[in-house]
Each structure stands twice: as C-alpha cells, then as structure tokens.
Image (spheres, helix red, strand yellow):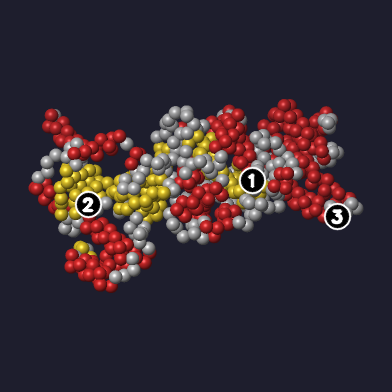
C-alpha cells in the first residue's frame, strides 16, 4: 500500500517541478491603450495576453515582427521593456443566471458594489454565429409593450430589429420599456405556473454612454422591478475604447448562454454608432488602413458577426437583438446606419419632428419596417391592427396634401379624422409599457369606431380611461385574450359589452 | 532616427541574405556590412539598427540563456543544450547567467519562449 502512495507522491513531485513553458514578448511601444510587442511568436489572433500587474490585453494585430495588443485595464503601470506572456486562452467572461440583476464591465467583472458573482461557467467573447442547420425561423412574438410597435412593426424572438434616430428621440426609452415589459410578462407568466411559459431575460449593453445615463437606466429598471431579469454590461464613455469595443460581444456571450440553455433572451446594444467609433479609434492606433469616414474596412464585419449571433435555435432558445444607432440630422444614409440597416431584419425609425410635435414614441411609420416579425405576431393583434399601417400611411399623405386647401370631400375628411385619432392613440408615456391584451382591446374599440365621437384632443384621456376600466374591472376578459391570443366570438362579445359599459360612463374632460 | 518603410524593407532583404540554411552566417554578415560601407545606402544608421535587430532576434533563437539562482554545472548546461536542440531542431548553445531573484531553480529563455522552473516563477503563478 505504501508503495502506491510513494508512486503518487513521486508523480506529484515530478509534476510540481515540471517546467512551465511561456511564450513571451517585450513591450516596444505603448500609447493610447495599445501596446506594440516584440516577440510573442506563438500568439494567436484574439488571444489574451498577460501584462505585468495582472493587466490583460488582446492580440489584435499579428504582424511580421511585432504584435499589436489592446490593453483592457490600467495602462499607467506599464512601460517599455516590460515582459508580456501569452495565456493560450481566448477572452472569456462568466455567464449564467448568477449575473441577473447585476451590472458588469466588458470583462464580466461586477461594478455595482454588490460583491463577487458566483458563476461557474464562462463563454468566449468572440464566437462564430450559429449556422443554417441549427436555426429556426422566427415565429414567436416578443412584445415591447409599445402599441405603435407591437401593432405595426412586430418583433419576434430571435429577430434583429434596429432602433435608429437622432439624439434625444427616445431610442433608449423604447429599449428600456421593452426590458420592463419583459419583466412584467415574466412575472405574470411565472406566477401563472404555466409549464410552457418561456421567460425572456434581458441584457442591456451600454457603450460609450455617459455614466449618469447608465445610472438613470439602472434606476428606471430597478424602480420597475425589472433588474432581477436583466444584466447590464457597462462600458461608459470614460472606459477605454478596447472595453467599449468588447462590451457588445461580451453581452452577446451572456445572451448566448441563455439561448444555448433553452431560454429566451433579449439584448440591447446601446449604441452601435459609438461602438463603431471605439473600433475606429483602436484600428487607427493599430495603424490599420482606414476607409470611408476613416472607419476600417472590416467595420461591416464587426457588426455583422455581432448581430448574426442573435438567432432562434431549433430545440433550444433564442436571442433577440435590438441594436441602436444614432443618426446625425436624420441622415439614415450615412455609413454605419446603412451597414446596420442592411444587417438587421428591420428598423424602427424615430423622427425628431414627430418627437417635437409631442408624438411619443416618435416612430416614423413610413420608414419603419419589420421584415420577419409579422409571422411572429399573435392573431388577435393581426385581427385588430392589420389595417393600421395602411390607414396611417394614407393619413400622412393626405395630411400633407390637406394643408393646401380647406375644401375636402367627406372620404378624405374621414381618413384624416381616423388618422389623427390613431396618432393620438399611439401616444404613450415612457416607462409605461402596455400589456398586449390591453393593446388589443384598445385597438378593437378603435376599429369599431368607439373613438369617433370623441374629440381628437380627448383621445389620449379616453384611451387611458378605457385601459383603467379594463385592468380594474375586466381582468377576466383580459386574461382570456392573453390566453386565447385570438378574437373569438366570445371575446368579441365581451369586448363589445365592456366598450359599451365604458362608453356610457366616460366623460371627456 | 526611426527606420522608414523602405529602410525596413532593405534591412529585411539584407537579413535574408545573411541566413544560410536557417543559420546566421558570419561570412554573409561580414559581406552585408562591407556592402553597406561601400555603397552607403540612404539612412545607414537606421538601416544597420534594423538589420542588427533582426540578426539579434534570429541569434536568440539559437541561444538558450539559462538564468539560475544556485550553482549550475556544465553537465546541466549540456543537458539543456541537447534538449533544446532536439526541441527546436537546430543547434542551440546554452549560456549561464546568475539571477538571485529567482530564489531557486532555473529559467531558460530561447527566443521568445521561456521555460520556468524557478521558485520565484512558481510563486508568481500562485499569486495570479
């Protein structure tokens, strides 16, 4: 027996004295968060490299006689001549449900002061997107809680829907509302005990934003009790460009964990314009050739490989992506906007003019489209809101035309009246997503002309009054709409009765 | 003065001429130096520095620098030479260099590869 123990001990001794091979290099130059390293002959593309003081970098440029590394930490302690070693590992971050309710940086390290994250698994930050065979077409809805979107530009689980608009048009608000709506649906669904219910977990990636904005978003999610279903990846403007470049990929890795493990996730990239700027900065410092608007040639690939990771997998879960792009003076034909428009499955365009007119969310119906979402839309929404987009388009066209004259025929006047009512109805305060069954009920009474007798300026209050009436007195009917997801005779009769009852009590103020 | 693109390219060409069968040839190096002296190309100092850099990197690949905290015998150096020559499939010569900061053990450097058996290296690994 003692012989066996000796054998094991000898083996341990042999192992503990075994030479460790490291491939090393020396910092030649270091500037702007990028180090040029001599040596590192065995380094792989995108491999993590170890700098002195526990600082990590990523090898992004493998040149003939030097390696360009972006540094993901404090560069102030590094100097020329410092030794750098390869790690043999690709950059990975912790993943899993333990991260829900937490705020992490681009490397998955907590930054919210709530202590360490107990995560057992890690996922690589860069991963090849799922192929054709494993994918499934988008057919399940993802409700944003925003009536204008859910009824006219529906989003499905696994879709990539771009949110695009100028600064201050409510892009982030739409994303935050959607996250809050997922949390509300999750709570209702999980409380119902339905085994087929699939909660949606959210990941919000803040790239290049002001710290105060990130704090505001966190506070909004916390106030709505949505943070428990959300992970926030923060790479604010004060963070180095390398972290800003990596944050969306880290977020995608977090989302992929949910997708690979049979769950559904939603990821918001807020925003990819700043992400492209961070990547341009890194590329210019790495002396990569620049192209249009000084962006490197692979900026399209940067976003396509990121957004292709959003998918619905056969037999597994899904990852829905809501990338955000900020335009300058409404120019959607700029380089990065056109790139991302062509990659995504549709876009929600927010207009400054509409926003300033008080039409919020300022969704431009004409320029917004969802290419795959309609197949994911539930039947009841199709039944009550199928014609809305056409009616609104007609209204916009006639509204412009009607400005030139006052003599209008009855049909034109009716179209204008209806359009202005739809516009009013779609006005929605921020952080207040509406459940899909309530949306369907409101659109039903619009379709049945219950709002026609109400003055346009009172439409918002009428709609709110009807919503309150439904949620306080007709919860059974709402549950039925939610469960059936289609307009049956019974539901229609119930809605008609509810609308008549509400109409008799409603007084416009 | 830093070497420009053309100078770097010339240094690379001169370096290629200096390597025969994967080994830096002293005769070829002498020839290159003679050529530089004779022809005096543009930016000779930058050119020679770039050339020197490339030759130094190449020579480092055939040299095992053995840092040691305690005594190291000639037999141990021979063993290291043999092992490294076998591993890199080229003649590697070992040279000893005392380094008390290693505390105990050896650190062998061949080109950009480092083989660490020192106590200081193991302690550093534990601290990460």
Looking at the rendered structure, the secondary structure element under dot 1 is loop
Mark 2–mark 1 distance (CA, rounded to whole Å): 55 Å
Q: Position of residue A430 (x, y in %)?
A: 67, 36
The answer to whether marks 3 and 2 sit on the same chain is: no
Residue positioned 20% across, 56% down in the render? B62
Name the residue located 67 percent from the left edge and 32 percent from the top edge.
A479
Residue A43 in view (yes/no):
no
Question: Is A58 on the left or on the right of A173, as rendered?
Answer: left
Label 1 – label 3 distance at C-alpha:
32 Å
| Quadrant position of the N terminus of chain A in the picture | top left
Residue denoted by label 3:
A404
Observer-nearest of A477 and A224:
A224
For the point 75% across and 29% down, which residue is it?
A469
As drawn, the label of residue A363 is none
- Image disc number at residue A167: 1
Q: Mark 2 points at which residue?
A: B110
Residue A349, percent from left and from top? 66, 49
Give the SS element for disc 2.
Answer: strand
Return the chain for callout 2: B
């Amino acid at each position: 027996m003692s012989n066996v123990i000796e054998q094991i001990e000898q083996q341990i001794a042999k192992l503990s004295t075994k030479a460790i091979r490291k491939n090393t290099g020396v910092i030649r130059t270091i500037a702007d968060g990028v180090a040029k390293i001599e040596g590192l002959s065995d380094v792989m593309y995108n491999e993590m490299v170890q700098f002195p003081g526990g600082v990590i970098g990523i090898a992004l440029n493998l040149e003939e006689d030097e390696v360009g590394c972006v540094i993901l930490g404090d560069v102030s302690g590094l100097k020329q001549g410092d030794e750098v070693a390869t790690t043999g590992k690709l950059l990975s971050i912790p993943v899993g449900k333990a991260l829900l309710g937490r705020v992490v940086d681009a490397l998955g390290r907590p930054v919210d002061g709530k202590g360490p994250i107990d995560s057992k698994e890690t996922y690589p930050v860069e991963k090849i997107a799922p192929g054709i065979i494993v994918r499934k077409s988008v057919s399940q809805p993802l409700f944003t809680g925003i009536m204008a979107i859910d009824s006219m530009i529906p989003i499905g689980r696994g879709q990539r829907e771009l949110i695009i608009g100028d600064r201050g048009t409510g892009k982030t608000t739409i994303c935050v509302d959607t996250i809050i709506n997922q949390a509300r649906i999750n709570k209702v669904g999980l409380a119902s005990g339905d085994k087929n219910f699939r909660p949606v977990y959210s990941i919000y990636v803040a790239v290049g934003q002001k710290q105060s904005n990130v704090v505001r978003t966190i506070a909004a999610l916390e106030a709505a009790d949505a943070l428990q279903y959300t992970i926030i990846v923060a790479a604010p403007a004060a963070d180095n460009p390398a972290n800003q470049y990596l944050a969306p990929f880290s977020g995608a890795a977090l989302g992929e964990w949910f997708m690979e493990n049979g769950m559904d996730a939603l990821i918001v990239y807020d925003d990819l314009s700043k992400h492209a700027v961070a990547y341009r900065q890194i590329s210019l410092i790495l002396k990569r050739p620049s192209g249009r608007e000084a962006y490197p040639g692979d900026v399209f690939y940067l976003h396509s490989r990121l957004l292709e990771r959003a998918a619905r997998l056969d037999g597994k879960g899904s990852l829905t992506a809501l990338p955000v792009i900020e335009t300058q003076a409404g120019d959607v034909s700029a380089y990065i906007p056109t790139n991302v428009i062509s990659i995504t499955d549709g876009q929600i365009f927010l207009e400054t003019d509409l926003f300033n007119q008080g039409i919020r969310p300022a969704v431009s119906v004409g320029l917004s489209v969802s290419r795959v979402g309609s197949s994911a839309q539930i039947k009841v929404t199709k039944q009550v809101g199928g014609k809305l987009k056409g009616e609104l388009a007609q209204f916009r066209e006639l509204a412009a035309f009607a400005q030139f004259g006052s003599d209008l025929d009855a049909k034109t006047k009716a179209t204008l009246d209806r359009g202005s009512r739809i516009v009013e109805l779609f006005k929605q305060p921020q952080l207040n997503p509406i459940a899909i069954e309530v949306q369907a009920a409101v659109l039903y009474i619009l379709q049945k002309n219950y709002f026609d007798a109400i003055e346009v300026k009172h439409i918002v209050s009428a709609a709110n009054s009807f919503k309150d009436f439904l949620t306080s007195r007709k919860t059974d009917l709402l549950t039925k709409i939610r469960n059936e997801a289609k307009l049956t005779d019974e539901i229609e009769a119930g809605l008609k009765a509810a609308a008549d009852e509400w109409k008799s009590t409603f007084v416009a103020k | 003065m830093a070497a420009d693109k053309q100078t770097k390219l010339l240094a690379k060409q001169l370096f290629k001429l200096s390597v025969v069968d994967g080994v830096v040839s002293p005769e070829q190096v002498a020839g290159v130096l003679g050529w530089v002296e004779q022809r005096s190309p543009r930016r000779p100092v930058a050119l020679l520095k770039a050339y020197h850099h490339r030759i130094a990197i190449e020579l480092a690949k055939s040299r095992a620098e053995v840092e040691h905290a305690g005594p190291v015998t000639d037999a141990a150096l021979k063993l290291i030479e043999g092992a490294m020559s076998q591993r890199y499939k080229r003649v590697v010569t070992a040279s000893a260099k005392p380094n008390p900061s290693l505390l105990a053990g050896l650190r062998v450097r061949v080109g950009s590869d480092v083989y660490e058996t020192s106590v200081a290296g193991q302690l550093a690994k534990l601290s990460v």
